[in-house]
Amino acid sequence: MRIGPPVEASVPTGTPRPPRDARPASGAPAPPARTDPRPESEPATDEQVDKAIQAANRFMQKIATNLKFEKDAESGRLVVRVIDSETKQVLRQMPSEEMLAISRALDGVQGLMLRQRA
């Protein structure tokens, strides 16, 4: 079996494609290539993460009362819950409680392995 270059399914065979550096039909210059505007920096602190979570929750309360953002106390991971507006029951959680438990267990095993190596 011969494998060739990928074929784009969205362009039918025989349809001419404009060059990548072509200007839009409006004559405006093409937008510059996207680059990450954020300078390289240190990871966010726990306080910054907590403030971002609180801001996200305030924002979501204005538009939808059924999403809640939290930080798992044991792992420090971000948890998103979808909550039924009427019953206040958790409909979905990402990551799930099971995945958080697995993550905690793996963190514990990793700690044991590091202590055993030392």
Image (cartoon, rainbow, N blue to C red):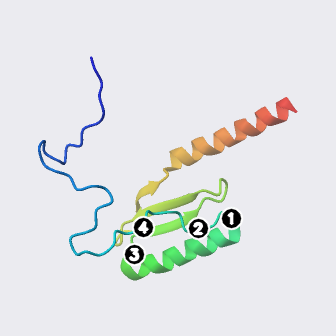
**Which label is found at residue 41?**
1
Q: How packed is label 4: few (under 14 Cα within 10 Å), some, or many (20 or more)?
A: few
Q: Quadrant location of residue 70?
A: bottom right
- Which label number is shown at residue 32? 4
- Dots 3 and 4: beta carbons under 8 Å? no
| Nearer to me, 13 or 75 | 13
For the residue pair 56 and 23, the one nearer the viewer reads as 23
Tell me, yes or no, whether the two marked residues, 1 and 2, touch with CB atoms within 8 Å.
yes
Q: Nearer the viewer, mark 3 or mark 4?
A: 4
The front one of 44 and 49 is: 44
- The three-letter amino acid code for the residue at tag 1 is Ser
Q: Which residue is mark 3?
A: 65
Distance in Å between CA atoms under marks 1 and 2: 8 Å
Q: Secondary structure at mark 4?
A: loop
Neighbor class of circle 3 (other Cα within 10 Å; few <14, some 14-19, many 20+) is some
Q: Secondary structure at mark 1?
A: loop
Structural distance between the alpha carbons of marks 3 and 4: 38 Å
Q: Residues within 10 Å of mark 2 (few under 14, many from 20)?
A: few
Instruction: Compute the Cα span from label 4 to label 1.
Output: 24 Å
